Image (cartoon, helix red, strand yellow):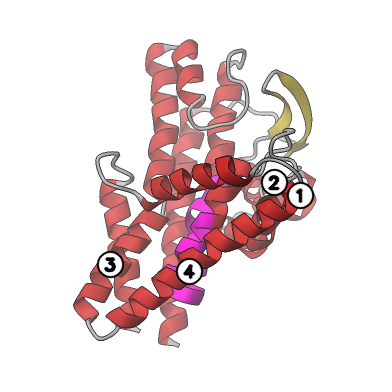
């Protein structure tokens, strides 16, 4: 039990203190480089869907097997096990970075103006930001914080609880594959098909669990109602649930038309309260994200104690 709980607590503490410092080597950046090499090697010619499926299965399976064998050997060396597992949890969590990147957008918007806010936002979202107004910039920050709370925090913790660092990192590999090759462009429509479907499947439970924890930490009946009313309306089968929860908690509205790569995408609205998003809503979201993370970790600890 200590080999699960101690790394969990230490890794969470490290994430709170350090976030994602760019001067440290990060396994996700390594994942990205490997995926890029595999993409260049196999995303060509015929049978791209089969090639993409085999690439995804190989990378995720290889990640899990190597780490499973490593930590199996380290069970005889508990101090080293805890040290490496703590690093795995630290690198697997993104709550500090998620809040910090959102704050950089808000700070730029409040202190330097709309153009600076748009530019900073472009680093963390996929939509076109050049023509967004202040309300849309703030809304995009909160949407990102809600959506990524699932696949950047609760999802990794969920899979850590099921299978330790090996399963956590296998999940992170799947998530990285989704972010890099799961596009509907001509290049990736076939090659990234399986990566997209697998990511959707892996996040079915974490996304809904995230939404429930979000409304729990704020005791928000409105958030619960929004989950059932709007959670399924997002284009993603999962992203809409935490966004709906936050929209209900803050009594605001997300979604709606946005431009992606120059094309207007008419997304449905999530929520029905048309209110002006303020910096207070950012801090409320920060509380929700942090409290959700703490409750999730507490739940894992209780699970193993029980």
In three-dimensional space, the C-alpha distance between marks 4 and 1, rounded to whole angstroms, equals 26 Å
Q: Give the residue displayed 35% in from the left and 62% down from the top.
A: 88
* Labels 1 & 2 near each other (Cβ < 8 A): no
Disc 2 target residue: 191
In the rendered image of this protein, does residue 57 appear above or below residue 302? Answer: above
Q: Nearer the viewer, mark 4 or mark 2?
A: 2
Task: State which tag comes first along the sequence, 3 or 4.
Answer: 4
Task: State which tag comes first along the sequence, 1 or 3.
Answer: 1
Q: State the image coordinates of residue 98 (x, y, percent, origin top left).
A: 44, 42
- Residues shaded magenta: 148-173
Residue 165 is a magenta residue:
yes
Task: State which tag comes first along the sequence, 4 or 2.
Answer: 4
Disc 3 target residue: 84
Q: State the image coordinates of residue 94 (x, y, percent, origin top left).
A: 42, 49
Residue sitting nearer the eye, 176 or 159: 176
Disc 4 target residue: 64
* Labels 4 & 1 near each other (Cβ < 8 A): no
Q: SS class of the residue under badge 4?
A: helix
In three-dimensional space, the C-alpha distance between marks 1 and 3, rounded to whole angstroms, equals 39 Å
Tag 1: Cα neighbours inside 10 Å, few (<14), some, or many (≥20)?
few
Disc 1 target residue: 47
Image quarter (top left, top right, bottom left or bottom right) of the C terminus: bottom left
Q: Quadrant of residue 130?
A: top right
Q: Quadrant of residue 91?
A: bottom left
Task: State which tag comes first along the sequence, 3 or 2.
Answer: 3
Residue sitting nearer the eye, 156 or 295: 156
């Amino acid at each position: 039990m200590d080999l699960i709980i101690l790394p969990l607590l230490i890794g969470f503490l490290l994430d709170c203190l350090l976030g994602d410092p760019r001067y440290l080597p990060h396994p996700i950046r390594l994942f990205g480089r490997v995926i890029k090499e595999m993409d260049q090697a196999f995303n060509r010619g015929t049978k791209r869907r089969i090639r993409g499926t085999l690439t995804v299965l190989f990378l995720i399976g290889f990640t899990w097997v190597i780490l499973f064998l490593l930590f199996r050997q380290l069970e005889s060396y508990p101090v080293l096990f805890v040290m490496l597992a703590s690093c795995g949890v630290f690198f697997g969590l993104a709550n500090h970075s998620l809040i910090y990147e959102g704050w950089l957008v808000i700070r730029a918007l409040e202190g330097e103006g709309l153009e600076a806010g748009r530019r900073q936002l472009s680093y963390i979202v996929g939509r076109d930001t050049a023509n967004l107004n202040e309300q849309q910039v703030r809304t995009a920050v909160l949407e990102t914080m809600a959506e990524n709370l699932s696949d950047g925090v609760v999802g990794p913790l969920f899979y850590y609880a099921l299978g330790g660092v090996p399963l956590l990192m296998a999940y992170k590999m799947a998530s990285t594959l989704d972010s890099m090759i799961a596009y509907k462009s001509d290049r990736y429509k076939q090659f990234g098909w399986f990566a997209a479907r697998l990511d959707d499947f892996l996040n079915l439970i974490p996304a809904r669990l995230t939404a429930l924890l979000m409304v729990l930490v704020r005791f928000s009946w409105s958030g619960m109602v929004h989950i059932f009313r709007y959670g399924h309306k997002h284009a993603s089968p999962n992203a809409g649930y935490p966004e709906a929860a936050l929209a209900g908690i803050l009594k605001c509205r997300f979604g709606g038309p946005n431009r992606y790569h120059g094309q207007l995408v008419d997304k449905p609205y999530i929520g029905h309260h048309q209110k002006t998003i303020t910096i207070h809503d950012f801090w409320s979201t920060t509380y929700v994200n942090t409290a959700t993370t703490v409750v999730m970790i507490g739940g894992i600890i209780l699970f193993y104690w029980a």
